[in-house]
Image (tube, rainbow, N blue to C red):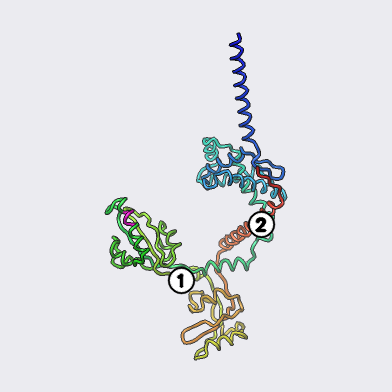
Amino acid sequence: MRHTFHRLRLFLFCALASVAGATFAQDTLFAPAAIVNDRVISEFDVQERIRVLQFLGATDQANPESALDQLIDEALVQFGAQRQGLALNDEIIAVSLERIAQSNGISVDELLARADQAGLNRESLSQLTGSQLLWREATQRRFAARARPGEPEIEDALLQRAIAPVREVRLSEIAFPTFERGEAGTQQFLRQLYQQFERGARFDALAREFSRSDSAGRGGDLGWTSVEGVPEQFRGIVSVLAVGEISQPFPVPNGVTILTVTDERFQAGSAASRVRVVYVEERFTGATAQDDARAARIDFDACEDFERRQGPVTLPDAPAAYFNALSQLTEGFVSQPVEVPGGFAIVQLCARAVDATPEERNAIADELFGERVAGYAEGFLQTLRREALIERR
């Protein structure tokens, strides 16, 4: 009997310990990780956010610190949205889920099905996606009046894009197949090759010696090309190379290639032909041409003299020496002396316009609006942070 009593007491102790352990684990799970004003963010919320980020592929943010930072900001977002009369609701969540599904090329039902398969709490997914859209609507409502660009700003943005110079590069390559040396031999060869570069070896000389491409006889020279004209798989590499820099080796079908930029130049892009200008020029010759031009520009004003006006012409049709002046001057202003064949000149811009469709103008306006709202929104969030009582546990 006594033995039975001891066993019963041991069973009850283990059962109570088990319940206590479960209670402790549950209490820890739902313990506050942070308090923002009167809103509690639990450890459970943090773990759920990590799982959502992993599910969405944002693995670089899927850690406790980043997850908690996001949840704190979202709490602030909801406080800020309340000031604009907005709150997270089913409609906002539905729209945000639709956007995430579209960006992944699937339906909302499929998105939610995948979330269920991953054992993900739908509410946790909705919290992230809905808060992002809520913040966008709140900040657009708050800053719409001051963020909407005017026609002069739209025109200037169109102009800057039209006259943006196109970078052209002169490329050289060293290309060789991997089967000649095998995988290990190729890696050893690459190390030796880069050691020679570090010792000052000429790229063209090494290309003639080691490259197996058709360009080897030309020292690897591939000629001039715009960065946009480079094959897509190389474009990102070429776009960040400065003149004289050598790329890391990258794989190509059946081989490896190394690239270098030997020269660069900037040309007016094809969009410059959409810019039309009217201008007046005054040319000066002789030994004092530059000084004469500089003195003349002070009181120069000839746009009202219609016989002297030239244009409207597109920027590429105007003298190449005037390109910078005609693209950058404010209407009515006179350029600094510009060197031209036989002397110097000054140019006064009388009028300038950019040909663009209504759809293009609306797209630019929306882009400028979005950029400005984003800037204002960051300042608003910083204000909310300063005003809030944030306690991290």
Q: Position of residue 261 (x, y in %)?
A: 40, 66
The rendered magenta stretch, by its main secondary structure, is classed as helix
Q: Residue furthest top?
A: 1
Give the amino acid type for the residue marked by disc 1 in the picture.
Gln
Q: Is residue 253 above or below residue 18?
A: below
Which segment is the magenta one? 186-190
Residue pointed to by mark 2? 379
Near-viewer residue (76 or 166): 76
Seen as rendered, the residue at the extreme front is 2
> SS of the residue at dot 1?
strand
- Toward the viewer: 393 or 38? 393
Question: Within 10 angstroms of label 1, few (less than 14), some, or many (20 or more) residues?
Answer: few
Check if residue 189 falls in the magenta segment.
Answer: yes
Height in image: 231 above or below 32?
below
32 and 159: which one is in front? 32
Q: Residue furthest left?
A: 180
What residue is disc 1 on?
A: 267
Looking at the image, tell me whether mark 2 or mark 1 is earlier in sequence order.
1
